Structures are given as structure tokens and as C-alpha cells.
Image (spheres, coloured by chain):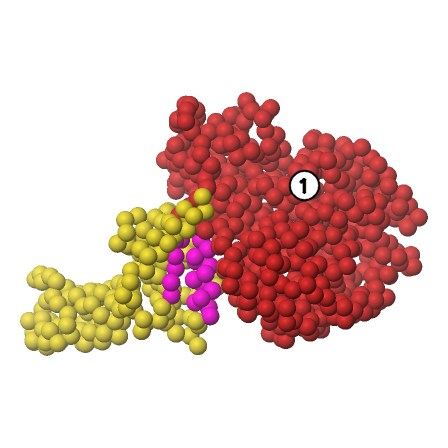
Chain colours: A yellow, B red
Amino acid sequence: MRQEFIITVYSENHIGLLTRITIVFTRRKVNIESLTVSESAIPGVFKFTIVIKATKEQTIKIVSQIEKQIDVLKAFYHTNEEMIYQEIALYKVATESLYENDTIEKIVRNGGARILEITREYTVIEKTGHKEETQALFNELNKFKVMQFIRSGRIAITRDPIERLSEFLKERDAFLNSLD
Amino acid sequence: MTTKKVTGSQAVILSLLEEGVDTIFGYPGGAIMPVYDALYDFDKNVKHILTRHEQGAVHAAEGYARVTGKAGVCFATSGPGATNLITGIADAMIDSTPLVCITGQVASPLLGTDAFQESDVVGISMPVTKWNYQITTPEEIPEAIAQAFYIAQTGRPGPVLIDITKDAQFGELEFEYKQCTKIRSYVPEMPVDPFKVKEAAEIIDQAKKPLILFGQGVIIGNAEDELKAFIEKTGIPAAWTLLGLSAIPTDHPLNVGMLGMHGNYGPNLLTNEADVIIAVGMRFDDRVTGKVSGYAPNAKIIHLEIDPAEIDKIVKATVAVLGNSKKSLKMLTDNVKENSHDEWIERFRKCDMIENEKIIHKDLYPEKPGLTMGEVIRIAADKTNHEAILVTDVGQHQMIASRYFKFRNSKSNVTSGGLGTMGFGLPASMGAQLGKPERTVIAVIGDGGFQMTIQELGTIAQNKLPVKIIVLNNNFLGMVRQWQQLFFEKRYSFTELQNPDFITIAKGFGIDGHKVEKRDNLDGGIQKMLDHNGPYLLEVVIEKEDNVFPMVPTGASVSEVILEP
Ligand SMILES: Cc1ncc(C[n+]2csc(CCOP(=O)(O)OP(=O)(O)O)c2C)c(N)n1
């Protein structure tokens, strides 16, 4: 059964690694739903958060192929339930429509969104949430015409009490030292 | 440690010398000229083989790597030079062959400007390299090359490409070399888990119809003795994949033949009766498994493998033992009971008899007028006492040679398995000969594949490499024609060849040779080739429409192996 999986990849910061990782997906014709890359809490270690729709079996194989890349430290996969995750969305609407009635303001307040910037011409609204939530807000706001809309890739954090990466790095260092 | 000031290109050569490189295959051009200039001063320390095409260089490097176990090294210039390496790199990737390819690149300020002979080699080679890296400053050279050798040669080996911009080759650095011994993000091999070994041993001890499948992992891991000890203690029959061939002597009583599409009857048929399969250093390629859903339905699978990504990739393992086969086989042997499986082995013998009667005897001792590939291979193998290195190209002759050559020594079979690269054979034989100068190297090549890299005759002649080349000429792209006959109603669409006079061509390159068309001249012809001092081309005209059998048709399960059309 195909479902959403969140793949997290920890890697060294090397040029070209992003391509190496995405090749693993394209070669198997698995579409990446969203992709976010940033430095992790550990300096020099980068973290990729990749969302795909695939079967569990496919996902396991993809993760082991990613882990096989020389510059990858570790890759994990999770179901949505196992993680806390968010996406951020920005909406630009005409400021005029804000003045015309107070519905927009209500939508913003009730939807847990906030206004980032107001100019004479436009207003930028921000909302953090799951895709369904940011989409719902889009649908509401679009009644007043959304001029621009953007949603980020997903970022996610495990529900696990331990920080997996630092544990992992400790083990890896000990292991490599034991080989000497 | 003392350092000395050198140019980037000198650092390239010095680094290779530090890694013990004795042979480089390559082709010069603008963007790698500084490296070639540096090489000029080191011709006493390292041999450079100028091939006639970069594809020749990379396949030669593969041949060298396969017989020595060391990384093959090749040089190419930017743009077309580098892209000409790609087929060989892809071949090395899928067959786990260690290579270090060094390509020149346009100067770093020109990167991304579509400069003359600029191509994105790092991008192009990414899917087919174990690792690749672009160097843009001279200081990076020693460390990147050290890492390249470490990555190429450890764990599951593979090709690595280092792209060096011209300004990095010209620039200067304080040279200091340290071999790479670890990389934080890379674990070449997992330590063998003794619990997994125990679990595997228990299953093996219980087995009634166990079968060992061994692949190239045994050869790469230098685990030949360990495999033999394991086989002999457990009395389990063992079958080889195309790349596992030569790991143990072919005539070992427990060696029951080749797996796969054109493998032997017994191991294919009986795979599906086995109750336990012990797969060692092999990856369940589709040419081995046939239809996966119909593969080994009764067997528990024990998979000894160095690459974690191979576990459960095609066939689900009941027990996976990760790690180097040399270690895991040793531990497994210590944990299993002595045993024998005479009745089960008798089944293989019966299959051998059937195959012998229906196929092998006719292939090796034909009574029809036309020559067969089988008899050529039989005579060449016998005359070299089964001690030659066999290099094959791709097609019918490859399957026939692999089936009938028979080996006594490991690392003696060089072929393009995973990629099936026509044009591999001739250049790979040069590399094999340079890697093992003391041994006889026999290259068996089809008339089609020979013409893909025929220009390497020039390299063979220039370097006086005493390769014995046998071209099996059926005037067809034989293997494709066989498929057309069997599955496309004999519609021979573009598989017939009008061939040149190969002997004249060889002589034009300065290589002696002759053509055999009759059985009466075959034995003497092969003898003449072997006695000849230096390279030699023997063209043998064989029956045009012979087929290779047995065969597991595409989409069929291994037990549906057929003995005749
Ligand atoms: C580079 C490349 N192109 C095409 C093929 C497909 N192919 C596989 S076997 C074969 C025929 C080989 O003919 P020949 O070299 O004459 O050998 P034979 O089968 O007759 O022994 C072809 C075309 C291939 N394996 N490699």
C-alpha cells in the first residue's frame, strides 16, 4: 500500500550530494513530494527531510540506497504518525479586500494565521500547519483572490525522546576507532 | 613529515605512486596536459598505456583490476575524453570493479560557461560512480586521491572519478601524502554478527537439500579458501554466478555448475527444490533468478553479503549475515556440523548426464561439419591446462566460454556481467595481461563486439602485449539472432554482418594471425596461436546459426529451464 513516508537523511556538507540523493528517487520513478535541506543542530552535518508517497518496501530500499552514498551519515524513514511535522505557507492578498469587509481578518484570526506585512497594495499572511490546513486557508482566502501563494517543504522532528543523530555519531566514532 | 613544493599535476602522479600504482591507462588532451607533462618525468616509476580510445582505457583498467584486485587507474581529458569513459565506469559500477578515473577539466573560472571541451563530468558520472569529486585547488589533490583509492578498493569496490580543473593542475602546493584509512560517513564493511552466524548455522545443519550460490564477492573478498572449507565441511553442492566463476576450481566435486539464463541444467532446475539457499557474495541478478516470484519457493535464504543495500533487494533473506565473506564464511564453517548430502548431489549428477547427452557433448565434440564455439573453447582450455586467464566479450561466445572453459585458479575469468558491454573484451584483455604479465591471457570475442573496440589492436601491438585473441565469427550478432529465432519468428532484423578481413586488419596493425574454417585445422591453429611469441589473432569461422542452451527464457522461472528450442 502506498502511503506518505518522511525520510530524514543526515550527511556531510558536500557539493553534489543533493543530486546523488535525488537520483535514488528518480531512478526508481518515485516522485519527491517535498524536500527541505538545512544544517542540523550539529555543525557541519546537513539534514534532508524528504516526503514521498510509496510502499513501505520501496521506502526501505530507497533508504538503504541513500545510506549507501559515501557522504551520507545515516538515513531514517518514518510514517507521519511517528513525527511532528509542519509546513509554512505565505499568502498575498490585496489590502483593499481587507478593508472591504472584516471576513479576512476573521479568517486569519480563526485559522491561526498571522499578518506579516501590510502595505497600501498588498497584505502578506503567514500560516504554519499541515498541508490540509494551509490548503484550507488558501481556499478561504481565495474567495477574495490570493495574488500569490507559496508553501514550504515539510520539516519534521521525531517523537523519540533521544536525539538519534548525536547518539549515532557517538557510536560511529567509537566504531571507527575500534577498527584501528 | 616533510613536505615539498610541487605543482598540482606533479602531486597527482606522486599521489598515485604513494598508492602503489604501477600502470595507468589513458589518453591525453588539453585539459589534462599538465598531468601528462608531469608524467613525462616519471616514466621509470609508472607505466602509462596509451590506448586508442578512452573506452579502451577504462575497460583495460577494469581488466587490470579484476585480475589483480587493485584499483585500475585511467586518465582522460575533459569533455569528450571524459564522456568516453562513461560506459566503462557504468560497467565497473555494476560489476563492483575498483577504478580510479582521473579527468582533466577546464580551468575553474570557466566552469559553467560552456567553455571549449567543458562537460559536467561530475554530474554525468554521478549515477555510475561509487563516489566522485571535483578538485579546483591544488591543495585538495593528495587528500582527494587518497580518499578515492580508499573508497574504490574497500567494502564493495567500485569506480571513483576525480575531476581536476586545469588551474588546480598548474597551481602549487606543499605536498604531503597520507593514505586514507577512514571516512566518518562510510563504513566499508560491518563486523560479522556472531548471533546471525549461529542462526544461519542452525538452519544449515537442519537442511536436507541445501544449495550454495557463490558470486564475485568471494573473489573480491579473497575468500576462496574459506568457501572451499565451508563447502567441504558441509558437503553442500555449490553453483556459481557468471562473476563467481573461477573462485573454486571448476572440477571440484561439489561444484555443480553455473546459474542463470544460460547456466547449467541442474543448478537452475534444482534451485526450486532446495530447502536452504546459502548465497555468498552474490546479488540475485535477474539473469540468475529468472522470474523472482517463481524463484526458490521452498528455500530459506541465508545471504552473506558486504553491501547492506543488497539485503532483501530482490529476494528476502531469512538470515542476513553482513560483512566480509572471508570472515563470515570462516565463522560459519566453525559453527556448522560436518555433513554430507549424497542423495541430493546425485540429483545434480543426473541432471548433468541429461545436459551432457542433450547439449554438452554435441557442443564439445560435434559431428556436424560446421565448427562450434564449444569445441574451440574446449581445445583452447585444454591446451593451456585450464590455467589461462579467460577474457570474454558479450554474447553467445561469452556464455559458451563461461560454460566450458574450466578453471583451476581464481581471478582468472574477466567478463562484463552486469552491464553486458560489447566491446569490453579486447581492451580488458590488455589490462589483464598487464596485471598478470606472467600468465597466458586468452580473449574470446564475437565478430560483432570485436568491431566495437577493434582499434585497441594498435595498443596491443605498440605495447607488445602477448594476448591471444580468438574471434568466433558467425557473421551474426549471434545472441540477438538467437533471440530473434526463438522469440521473434526468425525475423533476423539487422543482425547479419558483412565482416572485414580480420586477419588483414590485424596484420595492418602488426599483429600476426590466421583464419580457421575447417575442423582439421582447428587444433593446429590454436596450437600455433599459443606457441606464437607475442599477440596473435585467431579467427575461427563457426556455424552461423548455432544456439546456446540450456536457457531460462525471459519471464520464466528457473525450473522452467529448457534444453532445446
Ligand atoms: C554495447 C552493446 N550494444 C548492444 C548489445 C546487445 N547485444 C548483446 S549480445 C549481442 C550480439 C553480440 O554479437 P557478437 O559480438 O557477434 O557475439 P556472438 O553473440 O555472436 O557470440 C548484442 C548486439 C550489447 N550487449 N552491448
Residue B90 image point, x, y percent: 56, 50
The percent coordinates of residue B562 (x first, y second) are 75, 70
Viewer-side residue, B40 vs B182: B182
- Would you place residue B108 above or below residue A84 in this image? above
Q: Is residue B360 visible?
A: yes
Taking the image as shown, residue B87 lies to the left or right of residue B541, namely: left
Can residue B401 be found in the magenta stretch? no
Instruction: Residue at 56%, 45% (x, y): give it.
Output: B98
- In terms of image quadrants, where is residue A129? bottom left
Subunit of mark 1? B
Along the line of sight, the residue nearer the viewer: B24 or B66: B66
Q: Which residue is mark 1?
A: B432
Nearer to me, A50 or B502? A50
Q: In the image, what residue occupies the spot 62% across and 63% down?
A: B336
Vertical comparison of B316 with B247: above or below: below
Tell me which segment is drawn in magenta.
Answer: A57-77
Q: Secondary structure at mark 1?
A: helix
Is residue A36 shown above or below B463?
below
Q: Quadrant of the C terminus of chain B?
A: bottom right
Question: Is residue B206 shown left or right of residue B527?
Answer: left
Residue B446 position within the rendered picture, expressed as x and y whole percent measured from the top left: 74, 50
Residue B278: image quadrant is bottom right
Left or right: residue A155 compared with residue B101: left
Left or right: B298 with respect to A170? right
Residue A74 belongs to the span the image colors magenta? yes
Residue at 46% across, 68% down? A58
Q: Position of residue A43 (x, y in %)?
A: 27, 49
Q: Is residue A3 above or below residue B400?
A: below
Q: Please state which amino acid type lies under the numbered disc 1.
A: Ala
Q: Quadrant of the N terminus of chain B?
A: top left
